[in-house]
Amino acid sequence: MQFSNFGQKFTQHSGILQLMDDLGNALNSDKPVNMLGGGNPARIAAVNEVFAEVFAQMAAENAVENIGNYSTPQGDAKLIAALVAFFNREYGWGLTAENIALTNGSQNAFFYLFNLFGGKYTSDGLDTDKAILLPLAPEYIGYADVHIEGQHFILVKPQIEAVEHNGQSGFFKYRVDFAALENLPELKAGKIGAICCSRPTNPTGNVLTDEEMAHLDKIAQAHGIPLIIDNAYGMPFPNIIYSDTTLTWHENIILCFSLSKIGLPGVRTGIVVAAPEVVKAVSSLNAIVNLAPTRFGAAVAVPLLEDGRLKTLADTVIRPFYQQQVELAVSLLQGEFAGYPLHIHKPEGAIFLWLWFEGLLVSSQMLYQMLKEKGTLIIPGEHFFVGVDIADYPHAHECIRMSIAQNADTLAKGIADIGEVVRGLYDAQGKAV
């Protein structure tokens, strides 16, 4: 059987397919697996109790309209209204219902947005290929393969700065190389369709500063292209972000949110805040691809937005939980790698740690296979350098992403496996210090 070019592209091996396969297989395995690889959020008892209350109330009220009827292609009207009220109350943006569309998860939203703004443009009979500019490598693994034809990304390698965390050395932080970004030939030639960044960044937990965001916004406006911001882990929910930040919106910014990381990945609910013309485009795509977005996530989120519990959970339960997880994981890693060249990206948010094994001669893909054989899953770093020629960039082969969403026992066992394998590799290279 032969597939079309579309079929061949979307059935080939990809990093996101590997990640999701590993996640599903680990959850269904009868063998113990230290699952430090996937993007599943933690199961936090206090959060689940609130969800259970909402589910019980839905059942008591026989609220079948939320699952027994389609929404419009734009999404559930009650959730859109609740989001308009919430964002205007919190930030004073002056949104209307024309500024919000819902999707079946944020991955669905980025499939739409990257194909709306990246790819072939035709104007006055002339064809131009435009790319999505990712201003800071590494970036989210799920972006890489979403274009219907080819891969239309340009990614700027980061500046790497040694920093401290809680007064301790051994940490680093990626910074946007604005000099390289602003001098990109493609940007000057009008071959960029949009700029996109995640904040906090998946995989590193890096949080772009307000100054960096303002600089990116200024560049986007100067070139007449939108700035797309992925808030899957950021403000205002789940708010897994530990530095002082400001959330800004105007009609040249496209903000993307999700219910996944508050603990509801299975309801597949993404939120797009944008100019009305973008919302109409997303709604049109929804109608063709999905008929309409799912309504179950909306049924859960509406009461939590209206009475303020969603933001309270984010601020007082979810964020503190992950801050504790970060410090536990960092302490375990420091114990495993005392005297070895491990660098940890400064943890500023999200649910991961990004580990840099400087000078390790084994690629992170090979390290992934070695750890998988021991029963510990991580994600190799190569997949996150979308649009970068990693053959000439050793740093991309020296990094891995590990989740901190698991319980303390799983973290300890998984980090012990990472320590044992990597220390052995360093010892073979004579790299212990």
Image (cartoon, rainbow, N blue to C red):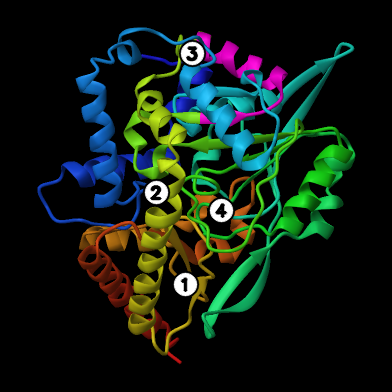
Instruction: Identify residue for label 3.
Output: 289
- Mark 1: which amino acid? Leu
Judge whether residue 425 can be spotted in this image.
no
Q: Earlier in the sequence, mark 1 or mark 2?
A: 2
Nearest-to-viewer mark from 3 and 2: 2
Nearest-to-viewer mark from 1 and 2: 2
- For label 4, the crowd category at 10 Å Cα-Cα, with few meaning under 14, some 14 to 19 and many 20 or more, is many
- For label 3, the crowd category at 10 Å Cα-Cα, with few meaning under 14, some 14 to 19 and many 20 or more, is few
Question: Distance between the Cα atoms at labels 3 and 1?
Answer: 44 Å
> x and y percent of residue 108 in the render?
49, 27
Q: Residue furthest bottom?
A: 433
- Foreground of the two, 233 or 60: 60
Question: Distance between the Cα atoms at labels 3 and 4?
Answer: 28 Å
Nearest-to-viewer mark from 1 and 4: 4
| 252 lies above or below 403 | above
- Residue displayed at 33% across by 56% down: 405
User: What is the secondary structure assignment of the residue under circle 4?
Assistant: loop
Q: In the drawing, what numbered circle is on residue 313?
A: 2
Nearest-to-viewer mark from 2 and 4: 2
Q: Is residue 64 magenta?
A: no
> x and y percent of residue 263 in the render?
34, 43
> x and y percent of residue 298 in the render?
41, 25
Nearest-to-viewer mark from 3 and 1: 3
**In the figure, is residue 344 to the left or right of 18?**
right
Instruction: Identify residue for label 1.
Output: 361
- Mark 4: which amino acid? Thr
Q: Earlier in the sequence, mark 3 or mark 2?
A: 3
User: What is the secondary structure assignment of the residue under circle 3?
Assistant: helix
